[in-house]
């Protein structure tokens, strides 16, 4: 059974619903979850917010947070997850924002991805993972896999 299928099964048993707010992964978490038959019982919706404007408009990320920290930051990941939770009716929301590459900078290198996790009734968590310059496709896949692992931790 795939990781996504295990998550769908566990969330179905718990009664929790999932939302995903994705930037650099462009919907890969939503695809992984909705590839599982019956995922509509669990997956509420996904937000692909690639631009800063989309993060503000669709998720309520504060323009001030983006200006102060940049899109690839834990504060933005937290606000993305909180916004997805608030705007979806889900019980759990995961967010992803990062630099898949190629490129990056000295301060925000290729492979840096920030994640947010919002669960109803709990403080919103954020973390940063440095995947390194693996190449765009591999960074995106690693980020999607990590987001799935975060979702699995909620119901473990």
Image (cartoon, rainbow, N blue to C red):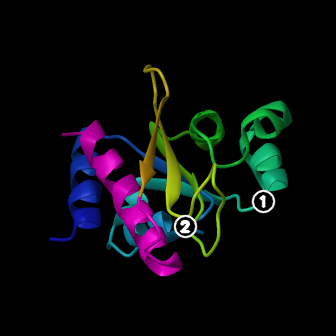
Decide: is 123 above or below 61.
above
Q: Position of residue 73 (x, y in %)?
A: 62, 42
Q: Position of residue 33 (x, y in %)?
A: 39, 66
Judge whether residue 153 can be spotted in this image: yes
Mark 2 lies on a secondary structure that is: loop
Quarter of the image with the C terminus in it: top left
Query: In the image, which disc is placed on residue 51?
Result: 1
Classify the position of the N terminus by image quarter: bottom left
In-front residue for pair 80/140: 140
Please tell me in which quadrant of the rendered image residue 86 appears.
Answer: top right
The answer to whether residue 31 is seen in the rendering is no
Give coordinates of residue 138: x percent, y percent: 42, 76
Which is more N-terminal, label 2 or label 1?
Answer: 2
Q: Which one is nearer the viewer's eye here, 36 or 143?
A: 143
Q: Which mark is residue 89?
A: none
Residue at horizontal 59 percent and vertical 72 percent from the top: 101
Q: Callout 1: 10 Å neighbours few (<14), some, many (20+)?
A: few
Q: How many marks?
A: 2
Q: Residue at x 78, y 40 (%)?
A: 66
The residue under the point 41% across, 72% down is 141
Name the spot of residue 23 as percent of width and height, x first. Answer: 63, 60
Magenta range is 131-156
Secondary structure beneath dot 1 equals: loop
Q: Which mark is residue 25?
A: 2
Judge the density around disc 2: few (<14), some (14-19), many (≥20) Cα neighbours within 10 Å.
Answer: many
Name the residue nearer the viewer: 14 or 57: 57
Asked whether, in this view, residue 60 is left or right of residue 132, the answer is right
The answer to the question of whether label 1 and label 2 lie on touching residues, with beta carbons closer than 8 A, is no
Secondary structure, magenta segment, majority class: helix
| Residue 37 sits in quarter | bottom left
Query: Is 142 inside the magenta-drawn segment?
Result: yes
């Amino acid at each position: 059974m795939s990781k996504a299928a295990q998550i769908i099964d566990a969330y179905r048993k718990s009664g929790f619903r999932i939302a995903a707010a994705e930037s650099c992964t462009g919907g890969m978490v939503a695809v992984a979850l909705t590839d599982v038959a019956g995922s509509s019982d669990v997956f509420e919706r996904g937000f692909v917010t690639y631009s800063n404007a989309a993060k503000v408009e669709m998720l309520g990320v504060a323009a001030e947070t983006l200006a102060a920290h940049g899109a690839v930051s834990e504060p933005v990941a937290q606000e993305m997850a909180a916004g997805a939770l608030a705007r979806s009716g889900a019980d759990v929301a995961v967010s992803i924002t990062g630099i898949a590459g190629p490129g990056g900078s000295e301060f925000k290198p290729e492979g840096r991805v920030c994640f947010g996790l919002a669960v109803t009734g709990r403080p919103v968590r954020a973390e940063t993972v440095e995947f390194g310059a693996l190449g765009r496709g591999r960074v995106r896949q690693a980020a999607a896999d990590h987001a799935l692992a975060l979702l699995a931790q909620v119901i473990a």
